[in-house]
């Protein structure tokens, strides 16, 4: 990647580019989604109380949006059946989704986005981050299987391998005493 990558908070003017990016990224980069469900997820998060505008980012090369990712509040459930205290605040955030434009796969953009994003989450004072996805990728940027922290998945893709649900504590011992289920 010879050009300079710029990572900045998303703006409303980016939304159309983000939709195109997500659709192509998931259609060409996964075997489980054509991207429409991921676009719906982003829109659902933006319309919810869990949205954190200052933790939703785009990556640009020469003014072109080539990546998108966001962190949102995601309270853990005390049971695998779901539910949580509506007044509860969350000391952890969920990273989802992460998209890189298909023309820019395997050029370090995803890793660069996440390294910067993790630093921003730390600056905001959160204790940890959860993510569901390809453990071969996320382990490279510091995520470990969530069950090591007492945080367990209940469903989702591809839960046939528990390593796909991961956490990263943002400082030593940050997740001590935090446990539950991601429903």
Image (spheres, rainbow, N blue to C red):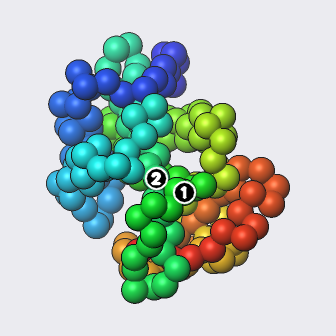
Give the x, y percent position of residue 18: 26, 35
Residue beneath the point at 52% across and 79% down: 78
Q: What element carries label 2?
A: strand
Few, some or many C-alpha atoms within 10 Å of disc 1 (few <14, some 14-19, many ≥20)?
some
Q: In this view, does 124 lie above or below 171?
A: above
Q: Where is residue 147 in the image (x, y as percent from the top left)?
A: 63, 77
Q: Distance between the residues labelled 1 and 2?
A: 6 Å
Q: Which one is earlier in the sequence, the residue at label 1 or at label 2?
A: 2
Residue 152 % position (x, y): 55, 78
Q: Is residue 87 left or right of residue 166?
A: left
- The residue depicted at 29 percent of the width and 50 percent of the height is 48
The reply to whether residue 62 is in sight is yes
Q: Name the quarter where the C terminus is drawn.
A: bottom left
106 relative to 173, above or below: above
Q: Is residue 13 left or right of residue 106?
A: left
Q: Which of 122 and 30 is in front in this view?
A: 122
Question: Do labels 1 and 2 touch, CB within 8 Å?
Answer: yes
Q: Residue 90 carries which label?
A: 1
Question: Can residue 105 be seen from the camera position used here?
Answer: no
In the picture as drawn, the residue positioned furthest to the front comes out as 87
Q: Which residue is drawn at 56% across and 37% down?
A: 117
Q: Nearer the viewer, residue 135 or 68?
A: 68
* Farthest-out residue, top: 62
Front residue of 117 and 2: 117
Left or right relative to 100: residue 169: right
- In the rendered image, which residue does mark 2 sit on? 73
Q: Categorize mark 2 by other alpha carbons within 10 Å: few (<14), some (14-19), many (20+).
A: some
């Amino acid at each position: 990647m010879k050009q300079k990558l710029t990572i900045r908070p998303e703006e409303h003017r980016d939304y159309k580019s983000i939709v195109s990016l997500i659709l192509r990224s998931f259609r060409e980069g996964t075997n489980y989604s054509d991207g429409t469900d991921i676009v719906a997820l982003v829109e659902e998060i933006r319309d919810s109380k869990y949205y954190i505008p200052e933790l939703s980012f785009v990556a640009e090369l020469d003014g072109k949006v080539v990546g998108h990712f966001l962190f949102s509040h995601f309270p853990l459930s005390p049971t695998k059946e779901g539910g949580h205290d509506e007044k509860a605040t969350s000391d952890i955030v969920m990273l989802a989704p992460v998209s890189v434009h298909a023309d820019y796969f395997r050029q370090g953009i995803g890793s660069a986005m996440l390294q910067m994003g993790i630093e921003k989450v730390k600056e905001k004072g959160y204790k940890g981050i959860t993510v569901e996805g390809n453990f071969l990728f996320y382990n490279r940027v510091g995520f470990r299987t969530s069950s090591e922290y007492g945080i367990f998945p209940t469903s989702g893709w591809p839960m046939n391998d528990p390593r796909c649900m991961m956490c990263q504590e943002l400082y030593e011992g940050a997740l001590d005493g935090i446990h539950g289920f991601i429903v």
